[in-house]
């Protein structure tokens, strides 16, 4: 990250931590500093493999970014919303339904949640090559920091995790790294996301769900932990459990693309966002994410050479000949999300078909 004198922007004041007695998921904590040696990677690979096969989520600590740098990024993330006019946001709004890629802003009230209620979520999406798109005036002086942060996420977090994923399948270390090139074709990107409090009527109509239960599109999602609660995962016993905030930690999960590539071994766990705990309900929920996807030309078929998959079996979501590329899958899901009429099953799960594959949404 840059060490020169930084442009001045308003400081973001995070909410106080919740004191509510929540039912938290028991997630593994991975010390990424151990990944610097072959012995450390071997140890971590087993921990990551077990976490991803059983829970689909884990925490990362000791990733290399200082708490002060973390706080600065939340200052920048908030500036993308609080320091940009509505008119400028509209000019820089993404036409993701046509392009199949998020770039620029997604404004509020675009996605349908339930019972006629639309979302109260703003996004600002930044391609990993940050200078390839137009940015609001407030962020232009911050582009060197955004560029450094995108590269940090890609090379210092994503690639080490992908190496652990490969080792966990007993494959060569760079198997997944070679599918996630920083200069390759694709939509791996940085995202700032702000959830705003809703009216009581909207909470009742949606049963307090702010973002439907879903699996992510890509391979690995990196969430920078923040204080306002709301993220929940669907546990194997069918119960939703909260994800606990850990200061300066990351929350990692796999998405559909990794599910395809790992033959169902690495779980794309269903997760959602709900109304925050009672003592945080007057606060907006600000998030920072790095959503990684394989290069667009990667065909999403199981890596059947893996000894682990050979021992455990492969679960295919479609025949290999019919499998989409990462680019086809990303465009199909992005274009449809929150925009299509979903078919509700008897269990209450909503479904749609993309590239011949059933995609489920949980409320």
Image (spheres, rainbow, N blue to C red):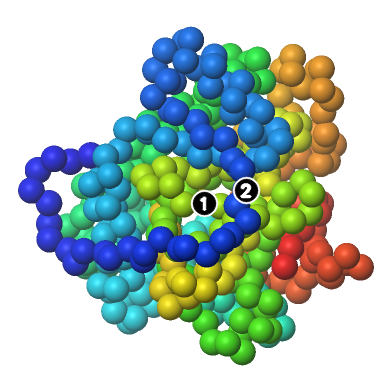
Across and down, in percent, residue 156 comes to 37, 31
Quadrant of res 286: bottom left
Q: Mark 1 = which residue?
A: 244
Is residue 125 at least partly visible in the picture?
A: no
Quadrant of res 183: top left
Across and down, in percent, residue 262 comes to 70, 30
Answer with mark 2 or mark 1, whichever residue precedes in sequence: 2
Badge 2 vs badge 1, beta-carbon distance below 8 Å: yes
Residue at 54% across, 16% down:
43
Count of labels shown?
2
Closest to the observer: 1 or 110? 1
In the depicted structure, whether residue 148 falls above or below residue 118: above
Across and down, in percent, residue 201 comes to 61, 89
Quadrant where the image shows the N terminus? top left
Residue at 73% across, 62% down:
361
In the depicted structure, whether residue 333 falls above or below residue 184: below
Q: Mark 2 = which residue?
A: 25
Quadrant of res 294: top right
Across and down, in percent, residue 51 comes to 64, 33
Question: Gap between marks 2 and 1, in whole Å?
Answer: 7 Å
């Amino acid at each position: 990250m840059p060490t020169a004198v930084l442009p001045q922007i308003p400081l973001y004041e995070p909410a106080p931590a919740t004191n509510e007695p929540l039912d938290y998921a028991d997630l593994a904590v991975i010390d990424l500093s151990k990944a610097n040696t072959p012995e450390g990677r071997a140890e971590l690979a087993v921990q990551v493999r077990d976490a991803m096969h059983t829970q689909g989520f884990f925490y990362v600590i000791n990733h290399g970014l200082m708490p002060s740098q973390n706080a600065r990024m939340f200052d920048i993330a908030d500036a993308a919303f609080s320091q940009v006019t509505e008119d400028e946001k509209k000019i820089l709004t993404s036409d993701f339904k046509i392009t199949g890629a998020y770039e620029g802003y997604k404004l509020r009230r675009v996605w349908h949640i339930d019972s006629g209620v639309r979302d109260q979520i703003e996004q600002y999406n930044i391609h990993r090559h940050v200078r390839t798109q137009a940015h609001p005036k407030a962020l232009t002086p911050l582009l060197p920091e955004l560029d450094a942060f995108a590269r940090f996420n890609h090379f210092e977090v994503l690639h080490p995790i992908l190496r652990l994923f490969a080792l966990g399948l007993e494959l060569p270390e760079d198997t997944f790294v070679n599918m996630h090139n920083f200069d390759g074709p694709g939509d791996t990107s940085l995202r700032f996301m702000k959830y705003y409090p809703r009216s009581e009527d909207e909470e009742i109509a949606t049963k307090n769900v702010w973002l439907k239960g879903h699996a992510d599109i890509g391979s690995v999602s990196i969430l920078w932990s923040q204080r306002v609660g709301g993220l929940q995962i669907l546990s194997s016993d069918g119960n939703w459990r909260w994800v606990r905030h850990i200061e300066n930690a990351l929350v990692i999960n796999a998405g559909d693309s990794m599910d395809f590539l790992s033959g169902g071994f690495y779980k794309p766990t269903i997760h959602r966002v709900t109304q925050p705990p009672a003592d945080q309900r007057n606060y907006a929920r600000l998030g920072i994410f790095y959503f990684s996807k394989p290069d667009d030309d990667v065909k999403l078929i199981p890596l059947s050479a893996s000894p682990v998959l050979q021992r455990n079996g492969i679960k295919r979501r479609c025949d290999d000949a019919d499998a989409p590329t990462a680019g086809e899958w990303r465009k199909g899901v992005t274009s449809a999300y929150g925009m299509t009429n979903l078919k509700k099953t008897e269990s209450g799960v909503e479904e749609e078909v993309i590239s011949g594959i059933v995609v489920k949404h949980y409320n």
